[in-house]
């Protein structure tokens, strides 16, 4: 498996969110959610499939996270949620907090994230 770039992590997180919201996920759902073109999504899904982070059902087009894809998506989602809440708790607007959390979640060290997570749960 290849090391995922930030965009790949975002796609996996989006698949998880859409799966939780809608039950099934297709490329068009991801395109609509992210505002990207269908060809861009198709290319990204091919890369994620070849890297064994997702499977795509040939007959329905439904996208499913593999165990490794789910693990990454879940970690990114947890980081996003905790960072967003933490930023809001220190006075950042919810919109800005969500945008900043999306960027921070990919670059923050595990040590720093763990400390924010501990601090956030103590509030």
Image (spheres, rainbow, N blue to C red):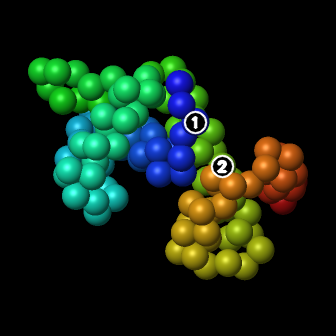
Choose the circle earlier in sequence order: 1 or 2. Answer: 1
Q: Residue at x 51, y 20 (%)?
A: 67
Q: Position of residue 103 (x, y in %)?
A: 60, 63
Q: Disc 1 and disc 2: Cα gap in Å? A: 18 Å
**Quarter of the figure with the C terminus:** bottom right
Mark 1 or mark 2, whichever is nearer to me: 1
Left-right relation of 45 to 95: left
Q: Position of residue 54 (x, y in %)?
A: 39, 27
Which label belongs to residue 60? none
Residue under label 1, please give it: 3
Q: Position of residue 99 (x, y in %)?
A: 54, 69
Q: Residue at x 72, y 79 (%)?
A: 91
Q: Describe the element under mark 2 as helix, strand or loop.
A: helix
Q: Most extreme residue toward the front, as rendered?
A: 2
Structural crowding at the residue carrying mark 2, measured as other residues with C-alpha within 10 Å and reported as few (<14), some (14–19) or many (≥20): many
Left-right relation of 56 to 66: left
Q: Describe the element under mark 1 as helix, strand or loop.
A: loop
Left-right relation of 63 to 89: left
Q: Residue at x 57, y 76 (%)?
A: 96
Quarter holding residue 46: top left
The residue lying toward the viewer, choosing from 108 and 32, is 108
Quarter holding residue 55: top left
Residue under label 2, please give it: 79
The residue lying toward the viewer, choosing from 41 and 88, is 41
């Amino acid at each position: 498996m290849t090391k995922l770039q930030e965009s790949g992590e975002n796609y996996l997180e989006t698949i998880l969110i859409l799966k939780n919201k809608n039950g099934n996920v297709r490329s068009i759902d991801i395109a609509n959610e992210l505002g990207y073109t269908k060809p861009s999504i198709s290319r990204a899904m091919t890369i994620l499939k070849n890297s064994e982070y997702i499977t795509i059902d040939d007959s329905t087009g439904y996208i499913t996270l593999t165990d490794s894809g789910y693990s990454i998506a879940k970690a990114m989602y947890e980081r996003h949620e905790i960072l967003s809440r933490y930023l809001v708790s220190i006075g950042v607007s919810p919109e800005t907090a969500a945008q900043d959390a999306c960027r921070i979640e990919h670059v923050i060290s595990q040590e720093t994230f763990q400390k924010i997570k501990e601090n956030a749960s103590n509030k």
